[in-house]
Image (cartoon, helix red, strand yellow):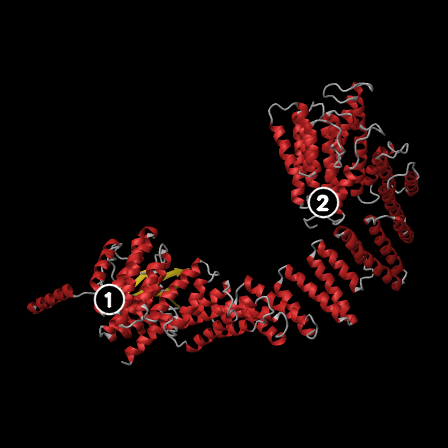
Amino acid sequence: MVSGEWPSVVTKSITLFVLTAAVSCGGDRMAHAHHSPFTSHCLLLSLVQQPSDSVDPDQAFLDALRERKLFRLLETYCRKQLARSDATPVERARYTIELANILAARAQVETVTVARAELWQQASALLRGFLESNPQHPQAAALQFQLGVYELAQGELARQHTKLAPQNKELIDSARSRLQAAVQSFRRVESDATEAMKKRSPGDGAAGDQPTHNQLRALTNNTRYRLGQALLALAQTYPRHSADQTDAASRAKTFFEAFTQRYSPNELTLESYLGRAECLRLLGDAPEATKTLGELRKGTPPPPDKYLDRSLVIQAQLQLDQKKPAAARNFIDDSRKLLKSPIPELDLLYVQAMLELAREQSKGQANLVARQLVASALAEMDRIEKEHGVFWVSRCELLLAELAAENVLVEDPSVLVRMADGQFRRGDRAGTVRTLDRAVKLARERGDENQTVEMAFRAASIMVQDRQFEEAAGRFSEISTTYAKHSKAALAQFMVAHCLGQAYAADRSTERLTRYEQSLEQHLRAFGNHETAGEVRWLLGSLRTNQRRWNDAIDLFAGIPQSSKRFAAARQEIRRTYESWLGELWARGQPDEKVATGAIQFLKQSLAARRGSPFTTDDVAMALTLSRILTHPSVARHEESEELLEQVLFGEAANELERGEARRLTVTALLGQDKFDAARRMIETEFVGVPQELFAVVQSLEDTAGRSSETRRRQVGKLQLVATERLVKEGEQLTREQILQAEIYLALAYVNAGEANRADELFSKMRDRVPNSPRVLEAQAECFMQLGRFAQARELWRQLLGIVRENTQPWYRAKYNLALACYHSGDAPQCLKIILITEQLHPELGGAELKAKFEQLKSKCQNP
Amino acid sequence: MTPMIDVVFQLLIFFLCTASFQMAEQSLATTLPPTGAATYSPPKEIQELELIRIDLRQRDRNLLIRLNGNPCSSVNELRDRLRQLLTLAELPAVLDVSSEVEIGHVVTVYDTCLNLGLKNIHFAAPER
């Protein structure tokens, strides 16, 4: 099936073919001298508008818009005029035709098939609708004629489509039905116009809206000419020498002959000469066709070049029809020397002639000559592709495919490649791969390594486009292993990884993942210095990150060279990986010194490169990550963090979220240095009107307090009070959930500040307001744990276990804390029982972090 | 002789009246708790541990057993796991039996629990 995108050159060529003939009244009495609306309707048949002598401002406006190709404005204007309730019948007809012409003009420049068909349909529907509602309209004949012209244009376009898909029955039928519809329309117009002419006399002038005799005659002539065109186009859709073709061609010839009785330089006559010659060619009457062309060429005054050019095409075609490819080739060679610009049809026929000759030579066993001819034809096709575009070269490729279908000269890889190109353009991917495989086999037999690899690569790439990833991976793998020293071996191996990655994305099985991983590793082993290695490292690094193999991931990302486009992203990935790694270690309470040192070193190196220059967005992310690590209790390098955060806050690159984070970290850094006053000032001045940021600060303060000694916790608690009281005051900006959380923070702040009674009161109020709230219960239980009131904590954890769903994180946390409360209450056996039973019934124990905690507590119980 | 026969008849009548041939139907709790009503409240120490929850479902002729959400492949596996648990503490058990499960399977599982020494075995009330 032909691709949806149709080269505009084709639509333009059809435009010229179908719509260039202006109305002619059998010679020189051009209707444009008259200014009646009927005449201008006929003129509108051509897209090449004659400048109007009319002083009608409306017409001038329309002409001006049309000249500038402002079709949308034209369309809007016409629709507006048609919508007027006071529009006269003449105006309705005029604007209907104008609108139909606009839609037709848009259709002709539209390259998308679906949109084009819709525009044609709209144009036809417009006219058809008008004719159905106004069958006796004086301009009905002109409108019917216009309808015929649209059908003819569509039919011709469809016929051109079939040249690229000659086996597509649907396309051929569609073309034929359009052309037959055009013939019907024109016949109707001819009959109506002839009837109308009988009622008028030759000398009659315009009578109101009724057309004059001359105008009717002009219309009749043009209709007959169009009938000839439509029948000729119809004949060209039938198989050669078939009865249908002969019938249609004969009828077309009759119409054309009416205009070729006497030579005249007007377009209609000249076109008719060519039409007649073509009909005679289809009927197999070469001498008569040649004679007609001779009459055209010898006409006085001589016809314009474009007609002479087209006559050359028909002449060449005649020679090919008579099985004289050598004569045709020579003729075309000579003709081309005289041409001012190349004619695509002639070039196509030249290729056809050479291929015919090649076919003849190969039958006579003169294969060397035949091969040379094919090589010349291929060179000519390259030239055609450059000069005339995809449509014409695709037609040449079809000729080549015909040759291949007869098994003539298919042992040449370059021929096969060309054929494959044609098949690919026609959307026949499976055929393309088969043809390329044949080319590969031939190239391999000849020992041409480059061509073998090239063809095999192409075939595999097409399979990738077709989403046959497994098979494509196999092919690429074969290329990279068989031709390991070839320059494309690395790329082939990369494609193996790409295909296996796509296959894994489609079906995430373990086996596919393993194969994908192995292909990536294999690439790095074999082609670690190739330009694709950077991308492979990125892919494998990402995989390792997902697998939580942090160290491997960092090594891979760090190995991406600066020249790779992934370099900057890789640096950020290393940052994120370090952060995730440390987060995991901290959550499990595992040692982190080595990782933290590595992370700090990396981040500092990344930032050191920017020394002296303001931070960029990437640098801000690096700086914030570094600050988070530096302010972590296990690292506790708060002063360095504070300096870094100053740079972030005073720079321009950080966005609001990042600034908020920087401010929060600054508070933590200040607390870490025991700068409580500075921290208080910052909380009071910097976090105004930003409750979300204050939330984060309050959370940080709670975390800090949780890790602090008793004395320090009180000081932190006082700061917490300052922050949370403000947070609760800004209650109107918070949601209900956030208000509850803020109150919980306040209660925790009371506990930290040593005001446990106030905390109890607050919890009591909260529990009255939201009884059985797991969050409140959990917070209160944690407070009790902190205050050493383990019996009360135990009670609350027990209640919480009854409320939260089993096997959820809060449930596991509650289980752990319950066990902890039992342990601290001196009931180690109960603690041990809880842990062992939970272990038995829920082996996963809520994840790695909690599992580690359970294990720790268990060993404490078992080894007091 | 007559008094001897009288005595014998008296004894016979006595033993006939006092003999029982049927076991009391008390082993299997047949009275299910009304829906939604909690009839069993374990002590706090037991609450802190965990209820053993055995879910029984049937698909075709296969019995599907889950122990606190974790699947067991067979009654034997269930028995092994329960045995391990019961070495740690005397836990109450709740049997949640779906309506399609055959009574034979229910009795088998129940007997398994009994044989292991589980004393507090309750049936979960059916959902409305």
**How many labels were placed on the picture?**
2
Pointer 1 residue: A784
The residue sitting at 74% across, 47% down in the picture is: A9
Q: Secondary structure at mark 1?
A: helix
The residue sitting at 74% across, 39% down in the picture is: A153
Give the percent coordinates (x, y) of residue A341. 83, 48
Q: Where A597 falls versus A652 (above or below)?
A: below
Give the percent coordinates (x, y) of residue A658. 44, 61
Q: Where A806 falls versus A97 (above or below)?
A: below
Give the percent coordinates (x, y) of residue B26. 22, 63
Q: Quadrant of the C terminus of chain A?
A: bottom left
Could you classify mark 1 by the number of other residues whose Cα lies within 10 Å: few (under 14), some (14-19), or many (20 or more)? Answer: many
Q: Secondary structure at mark 2?
A: helix
Where residue A246 sits, quadrant-wise, is: top right
A228 or A541, which is in the foreground? A541
Residue A420 visible in the shown view:
yes
Pointer 2 residue: A171
The residue sitting at 79% across, 53% down in the picture is: A387
How far separated are the C-alphas under marks 2 and 1?
83 Å
A320 with respect to A583 (left or right): right
Q: Where A381 falls versus A191 (above or below)?
A: below
A525 with respect to A231 (left or right): left
